[in-house]
Image: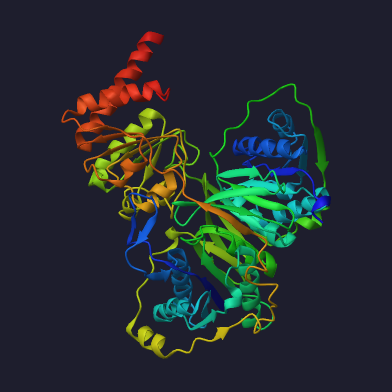
Amino acid sequence: MSIYVLLKQVPGTSDVKMDEETGTMIRTEHKNVINPLDENALSEAIRIKGAKPEVKVTAISMGPPHAQKALREAIALGADEAVLMSHRGFSGSDTLATSKALAKALMTLAGGRLGKDDLVLCGERATDGETGQVGPMVSAILDVPVVTYVRKIVLKDHYIEAERVVEEGLELIRTSLPAVVTVVKDINQPGFPTLSGKLRAKSKEIPILTPLDLGLSQEDVGLQGSPTRVVKVFRPRLSRDTIMQKQDSSCVAVDSLMSFLEERGII
Amino acid sequence: MALTYRGVMVIGEQRGGELHPVTYELLARGRVLADKLSEELSCVVLGHEIERFAEGIIQRGADIVYIVDNPALRHFLPRPYAAALTRLAKEAKPEIILAAATTQGRTIMPLIAARLDTGLTADCTGLDIDPLDRLLLQTRPAIGGNVMATIKTPTSRPQMATVRPKSAKPNSADKTREGLVVLKTYEDNIFATCEELIDFVKDTTQDVNVQDADIVVAGGKGLKTRDNFRMIEELASLLGAAVGASRDVVDLGWVGYPHQIGLSGKTVSPKLYIAIGLSGSVQHLAGMQTSETVVAINKDEDAQIFKVADFGIVGDLFDVVPELTEKLKEKKNGECVRKG
């Protein structure tokens, strides 16, 4: 059984501050991290491997050369192998082009098609793009089932049972393998790198795959392979005309809030 | 190629055998776009024994309603739903397909887009038609919600987008509207799948879903303890509101993840958002700044949350919140007395 974890390297958000004048984000430190939900996905793969040592965990990322760092982290956390898809031809790929390339990489790594017990895991969405589209798109291209918003995976023989978090509650879904599962934060508490993992991460060779290696032409990837185009980027009006109450007496402030809400017809 | 694709199609949402109101928001969005293009608006609903939805859908703006009825579609499952919708999209050839950015819509649309080999834009808050080239303008928050990006799908068809719930108002029902109802019965084998819904457990900890609520009362770390967080819950229940929380609070385990508002949680745009003891990280603001009215209560007057607030109270929440709760109770009781 192989578990493939799709990892995206994203800008760290813990140091993000807002520019008060312009309302844009300022990154005090250009620190890139593994997309948090992808880290949950990786931890889940490692948890499954903990119970079934024969499971092989492979982390796959598509991104610039420095995304290698995220993959080394994945090795340190317990992944067996890591593969980086990196080439300037990939840059500018939208979710469809990215998904096609990832699906192609998965097929290549699995020797043509996913094995009957294989599982592909990724975060439900990435903190930068926030689309949540890549997991399901990859499943459609590979023609395997997808379970999204998963907070628990129970592995059975050739199938899984997954708890899927939806608006009104929890669905229990059973699906055959191979399958793609996208996970939410609730699924686990990501672990820490082990010392042996860190040592392995240092020396581990991380193969780099280009579009050519995957049998993809220039029209399949990057901007050319992307049906969508960003045509405009603009700043929304963030600030509102705020009525501020700074009295010492909360009574006065609350009275004024009550009339404000009444005027707006809210209460 | 683009010429053979015409009209706007919205994918209605059925949950537990009922038509979810987000369908009417999509119809309002779709109607505007269809009118700008002078084309028809269609709506498709999938499920079993759901023909009764058609009338309401027409009253809210659809010209054509496609009902795809099959026992296999009773509950949402990605593969059977994607199979039916891909088939219908190929037959009806709409130039635009919209669905709600819900757990259903955000799952099903990528499957359809990949099968149709076309573009998809997630979580749009704004949709319009470019008057020059008649293309769909898809606007969504980007980079943590501080920047908006407008996206086009220039050549692939259909142009597909999911729309953030609560980002549009539904049209009121027009009982005089007429439309066509088309019953689609596809052969059973297209719904064959190896997925199965074995159980559904309703979330009973959540009286009101944060994304569906008209009012959200959200608390942050300023509440200090889980016990104090009950103030938020009490205020929420008094207002018939949903309880929201910052990421810190969820990480502390005071409330569950479904209550988390922000980049890694839910995005909400209720009529009223009350933020209490919550400083307003960029990530949190991205999840609530489109709320109609925002009230913030915080002791730090430099807190970011005040930047997106319409009404701010700088003060100790342990004074302000009990006072507010009391006054709301008085008002409520007063109304009861008057009614009585």
Up the image or down, B275 lies above or below A59; here it is: above
As rendered, which of B252 and A227 lies closer to the eye?
A227
- Is residue A239 in view from this perspective? yes
Quick one: which residue is furthest to the left in this view?
Answer: A248
Give the x, y percent position of residue A210: 61, 82
As rendered, which of A67 and A54 lies closer to the eye?
A67
Residue B175 falls in which quadrant of the image? Answer: top right
- Is residue B76 in view from this perspective? no
Question: What color scheme is it?
Answer: rainbow
Residue B232 placement, left or right of B76: left
Quick one: which residue is furthest to the front in this view?
Answer: B132
Up the image or down, B217 lies above or below A65; here it is: above
Residue A147 placement, left or right of B319: right
Give the x, y percent position of residue A115: 65, 78
As rendered, which of A149 and A243 lies closer to the eye?
A243
Give the x, y percent position of residue A222: 62, 71
Residue in view at x 82 percent, y 39 percent: B182
Count of numbered circles on the image: 0
Give the x, y percent position of residue A252: 21, 24
As rendered, which of B289 and A145 lies closer to the eye?
B289
Quadrant in which the C terminus of chain B appears: top left
Up the image or down, A173 lies above or below B43; here it is: below
Quadrant in which the N terminus of chain B appears: bottom right
Residue B12 falls in which quadrant of the image? Answer: top right
